[in-house]
Amino acid sequence: MADPLIRAEALVKRFQTGGGLLARPRAMLAVRGVSMAIGKGEVVGVVGESGCGKSTLARLILRLIEPTSGTIHFDGQDLTKLSRGDMRRMRRRMAMVFQDPYSSLDPRFTVAEVLAEPFRVQGEEPPAGRIAELLGQVGLSERLSASYPHQMSGGQRQRIGIARALAQAPDFIVLDEPTASLDVSIQAQIIALLSELRRELGLTYLFISHDLGLVRYFCDRVVVMYLGAVVEVLPKADAPARHPYTAALMDSTFAPDPGQRKTLRAIEGEIPSAFDLPKGCAFAARCPRASDRCRAENPELSATDHPVACFHPL
Amino acid sequence: MLLSVENLGVRIGKVEPLSSLSFTLDRGEILGLVGESGSGKSLTAMAVTGLLPLIGGRIAEGAVMFDGTDLSKLPEDRLRPYRGKRIALVTQNPMTALDPVQRIGDQVDIMARLHLGLDAKAARARTVELLTRLRIPEAVTVCDAYPHQLSGGMKQRIVIAMALAAEPDLIVADEPTTALDVTVQAQIIHILGELVRERGLALMLITHDMGVVAQVCDKVAVLYAGRLAETRAVGPLFASPHHPYTTALIDCIPREGMARGSLTGIPGLVPSVMSYPSGCRFHPRCPRADATCERTIPETRTLPDGGIVSCHHPLGGDHG
């Protein structure tokens, strides 16, 4: 990629818990050395199950939390080296849409106040007409600007969350499961809106989801994470899975067609605890292809057109 | 027929959130009950399990025929031999369905002790057997654990074990996998399917996910705003949906190789029970609606394949 907008290098995030009077502190690696680049105008999906580190990765990339190690370059500048003031100015260019439109909007703010806040954080007031324009961009009527979140449906609230992200005309938006708490009918509306906004405004998205079907529909490339590490990058949304975990995710995604029923080779077991990572490949205990080598050594992500971290790829 | 819901109407106070609902379900079958939030799926589950009084509701018309008995006419004390014993409920959130301060084994044992009259030892033996059948590793150890020590997928299996413990004929599962990760969802759906086939259970599976329906159900009832839109066998329903709402719901799920931009969703919202539209309740969101749809409630028509559809302008032939 000639000129990526985002370049994350070897990001690591370690969280520590416990450490009371009697309990020994326990550390977990939420993100274990993730590198990725996102080109201008690209939509990159990050998919994985709960606890795989996808939301932590998103927060690291926006520097909402500090990495334990590693760097993030945004349009050539190293975010981890920016001062607070420079970082705040840089924040105009990036935004986030959160999963739950019920808890991510302040219940005491009207819609107009929610949309004015990104300006106030920067010490400004929204330009005249900007709020109406934002509401128009997300397909809502200007009349809603005096409403409170509890007066709106989930889909309307999520549109407000998107309008808030658009407020400062950013280049890059992280979409953290933006449709996970919505009905499928509303999910499809929101995805259509996001596609349209991207086309019109030339946005770059990082789309985080647990729904591989949705990610493959919406994204140009797909990063698959398992227990804090990238296990595969699908170079195109319709590329076949090479990592057994990606294959398992695909098998768990049901098509709306009874003629395409999956014979479930249902992977057994569940995701191990991030506090107690196994030696070797983190997926080995659930993997039908695992060998002794997988249980002893950790496979690296290959440096190919279709990167995969597996000793026995499909 | 094990379960036959006939012209069911539910009232809560002054409103009637569910009207003229009919469908059937037999042993060894899985019925998918689908629709958006607010379409009446969970109310149907509560009507079938006799739990409407909990939310101040009641069955105002129609019948819930279960193995020859109309449950809607039974007083509470005569419902008890059915509920939990012959009809079991699996709820959406396994985190809240289990008692946090009771050990897993005790919570499952109680079902067999209460409903089958087994003593403590026999009940525990059954529990261990059930947990093993649900592929819970080290079932004996798990019996001594508390819910917080188990993962979400494990807890949902415990809830399913509780439902199975009294050997029910019918399981009503209300979004049993919505709170779970996709690989765990696939395991649970797989297990439920196996149980239905091998034990001749009937399963009423409530879901909003047409992918899950296509994967595991034998027949489907599509609800919209408290009315039945369409009910068919799963094959014909997906091959040639007759109700425009069914088509719209199917088209909300991304398919392999679908072109970007072709997923548009359903415009508008499910109306609230306080403001159900006149005529066909789907008409404000329907691409085929005309003046008739605004005025007149469509009659339910029985199709040659035995399905039922309720639409003035049904789609025929091929999907689309």
Image (tube, coloured by chain):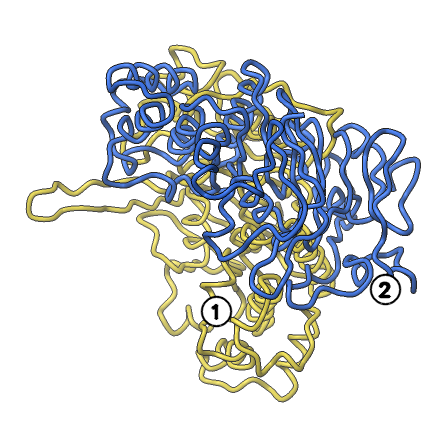
The residue that appears at 34% across and 46% down in the rendered structure is A13
Marker disc for residue B294: 2
Chain in yellow, by letter, is A
Eyeballing the image, is A123 above or below B107? below
Q: Is residue B314 left or right of residue B248?
A: right
Q: Nearer the viewer, residue B235 or A269?
A: B235
Residue B35 is at least partly visible in this image? yes
Most distant residue in the bottom direction: A128
Q: CA distance from mark 2 to mark 1?
A: 36 Å
Q: What residue did someone put label 1 on? A: A105
The residue that appears at 62% across and 28% down in the rendered structure is B68
The residue that appears at 60% across and 81% down in the rendered structure is A145
Q: Is residue A100 left or right of residue B278?
A: left
Instruction: Measuring from the top left, give residue B22's x and y in whole percent.
Output: 72, 41
The residue that appears at 57% across and 66% down in the rendered structure is A157
Looking at numbered disc 1 in the image, what kind of residue is underneath it? Leu
Q: Secondary structure at mark 1?
A: loop
Q: Secondary structure at mark 2?
A: helix
Eyeballing the image, is A256 above or below A280? below
User: What is the chain identity of the residue bearing mark 2?
Assistant: B
Chain in blue, by letter, is B
Instruction: Measuring from the top left, give residue A207's x and y in whole percent.
Output: 57, 50
Q: Is residue A209 left or right of residue A15?
A: right
- The quarter of the image holding the N terminus of chain A is top right
- The quarter of the image holding the C terminus of chain A is top right
